[in-house]
Amino acid sequence: MKVIQSIEEMKKEMRRHRHERESIGFVPTMGYLHEGHLSLVREAVKRTDCTVVSVYVNPTQFGPNEDFEQYPRDLDKDAEILDEEGVDYLFTPKDSDMYPNEYRTYVEVQDLQDVMCGASRPGHFRGVCTVVMKLFHIVGPDRAYFGQKDAQQAVILKKMVEDLNMDIAISVLPIVREKDGVALSSRNSLLKKEERSAARCLFRSLQLAMEAVRGGKRESSEVVNLIRNEIGKEKSAKIDYIEIVNKNTLESMMEIKQGRTLIALAVYIGKVRLIDNMIV
C-alpha cells in the first residue's frame, strides 16, 4: 500500500490508473477505523481494480463547540489495518493543502442539508459536501462507498453527484453493529463504561419502533413517542431529534409507508452525540 499526502502526487497516481483503464473505488473516512469502515473497504477491494481510502478529519464539518479536537485519531493503526485489507492507496492530505489561506469555495445541497442533523449542526453538511467534492476531484473514482449509519449524508451526497452530473456511482452499505446492537462509530471510543451501556437505548428503541410497525402501527407521532419513552429511561441520554422521513427525499412523513420510510435519531449519551436509523 502506498501512503500519499500530496494532492498532486495523488492526482498523478490516479491518472496512471485511469490511463490503464482500471476502475477506481474510493472510501472517504475520518479514520480511527472500525468494522463499519472495513465493510466498505472490503467491498471496494472486491469490486474495483484500485482501492483508495482517505483518512482526513475535516475541520469544516465541525461547529465551533463540537468535538474536532477530541475526535479520535490513530493514523499508524489505520495504515496497518488498510495494508492488511489489500488497499492500494491511503490518502492523508494536510489541512493547509485542502484549505489554503484565502480559501473561498464551498458546496451546498439546499433543503436536504437543513433538516435532521443539519438543523442541530448548522454548516455541517456544507463542510461534508465540500470535502467530499474536493476528494472526488482529487481521486476521480468510478465508485465511492458510504455507510447507511450516516443516512442523511448518503442522501445528500447522492443528490450532489446527480445535480452536478458527476460520473461516480455511490454505494451505500448496511450498518455494522456490535453484538448488543450499538452501531459502530469512531465516537463510541469516547463513551465512558456506563455510557457505553446506555448507548444501547438507540438500537433498542428502533427495534421497538420496528415491532410496532410490523404490528400495524402507522401513525408517525405514535412511533416517535414510543422511541422517546424508551430513550427516556436512560438518565444519561438526551434526545437531539427523532425523525420519520421519506428515505429518498428526507421529507417528514405523517404516516409510515412500507419500503419508503427512514426512522432516524440522534441522541447525546453524556457529551457524545450518536446517530442511528432503520429503514422500514
Image (cartoon, grey):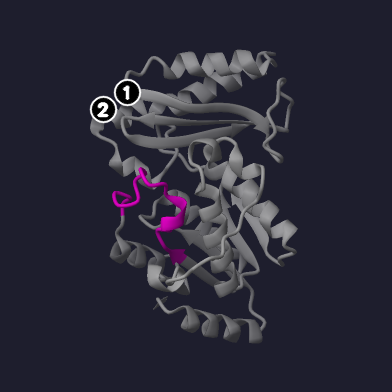
Q: In the displayed image of the protein, which residue is found farthest to the front?
A: 102
The N terminus appears in which quarter of the rendering? bottom left
Q: CA distance from mark 2 to mark 1?
A: 9 Å
- The residue at the point 70 percent across, 16 percent down is 218
Foreground pick, 33 / 269: 269
Residue 13 is covered by the magenta coloring: no
Q: In the displayed image of the protein, which residue is found farthest to the left?
A: 193
- The residue at the point 33 percent across, 66 percent down is 80
- The image position of residue 25, as x and y in percent, is 58, 67
Predominant secondary structure, magenta span: loop
Tell me the kind of residue under disc 1.
Ser
Q: Which residue is mark 1?
A: 236
Left or right side of 48 for 275: left
Residue 59 is covered by the magenta coloring: yes
The C terminus appears in which quarter of the rendering? top right
Instruction: Determine the secondary structure under disc 1.
Output: loop
Point out the frontmost of discs 2 and 1.
1
- The image position of residue 217, as x and y in percent, is 67, 13
- Image height check: is 201 above or below 93? above
- Image height check: is 188 above or below 197? below
Foreground pick, 266 / 100: 100
Counting labels gives: 2
Residue 44, disc: none
Left or right side of 144 for 197: left
- Image height check: is 192 above or below 221? below
Q: Which residues are magenta?
A: 54-72
Q: Could you tell me if the residues under marks 2 and 1 are in contact, i.e. CB atoms within 8 Å?
A: yes
Tell me the kind of residue under disc 2.
Glu
Asked if residue 27 can be seen in this view, the reply is: yes
Sequence-first disc among 2 and 1: 2
Q: Which residue is mark 2?
A: 194
